[in-house]
């Protein structure tokens, strides 16, 4: 009889340990699931940030080119106005013309 009780006790211990291990594994899965989901979301967001930073860099380059073109155009306009007002400044007018022409030629190579 004592052997049967010992066997029942051992079986109960084995079942208890097995249950504890199963519960621990379930809890571990529940704890790790949010971290995995969070890491996946972070990866997606980091990729999006990289894409946006690249787009911002490209936009900044375009804005700088537009700003330079605007400066060249304004200089040419000032030279034309100066020439129209007093008939002088032909050298300034030619210089502005050449800068505007160079800018347009260089811009054409970038497009």
Image (cartoon, rainbow, N blue to C red):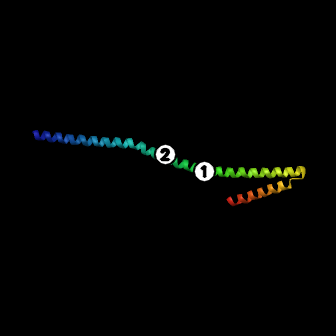
Tell me where residue 106 sits by quadrant.
bottom right
Secondary element under disc 1, as helix, strand or loop, is helix
**Camera-nearest residue between 61 and 29:** 61
Which quadrant holds residue 4? top left
Q: Earlier in the sequence, mark 1 or mark 2?
A: 2
Instruction: Give coordinates of residue 47: x percent, y percent.
Output: 52, 49
Q: Nearer the viewer, residue 71 or 12?
A: 71
Q: Nearer the viewer, residue 54 or 12?
A: 54
Q: Is residue 86 left or right of residue 25?
A: right
User: Residue 38, located in which quarter of the rendered image?
Assistant: top left
Q: Quadrant of the C terminus?
A: bottom right
Q: Looking at the image, which residue is at 24% across and 41% down? A: 17
| Residue 111 visible from this viewpoint | no
Side of 48 where 15 appears, left or right: left
Give the residue pinned by disc 1: 55
Picture layout, residue 31 above or below residue 74: above
User: Can you give x and y, in whole percent of width and height, for residue 23 in the image?
Assistant: 31, 41
Question: Which residue is at 69% across, 60% downward?
Answer: 109
Count of marks, rendered view = 2
Residue 87 in the image: x percent, y percent?
90, 53
Q: Residue at x 58, y 49 (%)?
A: 53
Residue that label 2 marks:
42
10 Å crowding of disc 1: few (<14), some (14-19), many (20+): few
- What number is the disc on residue 98? none
> How many angstroms separate mark 1 from mark 2 (CA)?
20 Å
Mark 2 packing: few (<14 Cα in 10 Å), some, or many (20+)? few
> Do the residues bearing badges 1 and 2 touch, measured as CB atoms within 8 Å?
no
SS of the residue under disc 2: helix
Farthest right residue?
Answer: 86
Q: Position of residue 105 (x, y in %)?
A: 73, 60
Please indicate whether residue 35 sits to the left or right of residue 14 in the image: right
């Amino acid at each position: 009889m004592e052997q049967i009780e010992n066997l029942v006790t051992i079986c109960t211990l084995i079942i208890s340990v097995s249950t504890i291990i199963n519960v621990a594994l379930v809890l571990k899965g529940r704890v790790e699931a949010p971290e995995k989901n969070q890491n996946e979301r972070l990866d997606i967001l980091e990729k999006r940030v990289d894409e946006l930073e690249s787009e911002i860099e490209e936009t900044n380059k375009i804005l700088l080119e537009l700003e330079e073109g605007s400066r060249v155009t304004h200089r040419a306009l000032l030279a034309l106005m100066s020439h129209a007002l007093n008939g002088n400044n032909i050298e300034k007018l030619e210089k502005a013309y050449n800068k505007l022409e160079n800018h347009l030629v260089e811009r054409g190579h970038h497009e």
